[in-house]
Amino acid sequence: MRHSLTILPAFAVALMMGTVGLPINSARAADGCSEQLFRDFWAGWSHDMPKLMATLTDDVVYEDKTVPANLHGKKEVQDFAQAWFNAFPDMSFTLTSFIIDGNRGAMEWTSTGTHKGDMPGMPDSRRIHR
């Protein structure tokens, strides 16, 4: 079974707002999506790696349309998330709304963070403004 998580936001360095659709069959979503799964997913992206990893299966396929990235397996997602954590040390996400239907769901979120480290194709924003 293929597990998929697709991020569909527009990206801005200082403030991000977006949506994510979760056709998901994660280890935590065997009985379908839940509000707690969404909240844990975004709590994980707010620098809580264990919580983030707990929302994913070992064979996760994670697609991020903002960068873009197409990742396979927890290790690739973990490395990707760690790069974001390093580049945005104060990054945090807030779930603003969601809809759940069985094993599918969609959510809207906002994120804030200060771009303090290089990412592929995105140099540290402090260097851009010097």
Image (cartoon, grey):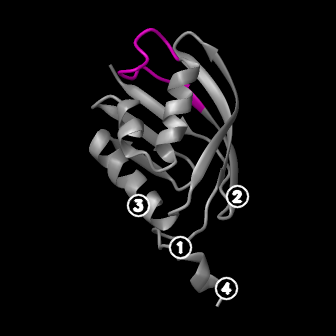
Left/right placement of residue 26 relative to residue 130 reads left
Instruction: State which tag comes first along the sequence, 4 or 1.
Output: 1
Q: Amino acid at mark 4?
A: His
Q: Which residue is mark 4?
A: 129
Structural distance between the alpha carbons of marks 3 and 2: 18 Å
Toward the bottom, the furthest residue is 130
Structural distance between the alpha carbons of marks 2 and 4: 17 Å
Image quadrant occupied by the C terminus: bottom right
Tag 1, which secondary structure?
loop
Instruction: State which tag comes first along the sequence, 1 or 2.
Output: 2
Instruction: State which tag comes first along the sequence, 3 or 2.
Output: 2
Do the numbered discs 2 and 4 sit on residues whose CB atoms are within 8 Å? no
Instruction: State which tag comes first along the sequence, 2 or 4.
Output: 2
User: What's drawn in magenta, residue-wise?
Assistant: 21-33
Tag 2, which secondary structure?
strand
Q: Which residue is mark 2?
A: 15
Relative to 66, say whether 127 is above or below: below
Could you tell me what secondary structure mostly forms the magenta stretch? Answer: loop
Instruction: State which tag comes first along the sequence, 1 or 3.
Output: 3
Do the numbered discs 3 and 2 sit on residues whose CB atoms are within 8 Å? no
The one nearer the camera, 56 or 94, is: 94
- The residue at the point 47 percent across, 73 percent down is 118
Disc assigned to residue 5: none
Image quadrant occupied by the N terminus: top left
Q: Which residue is mark 3?
A: 83
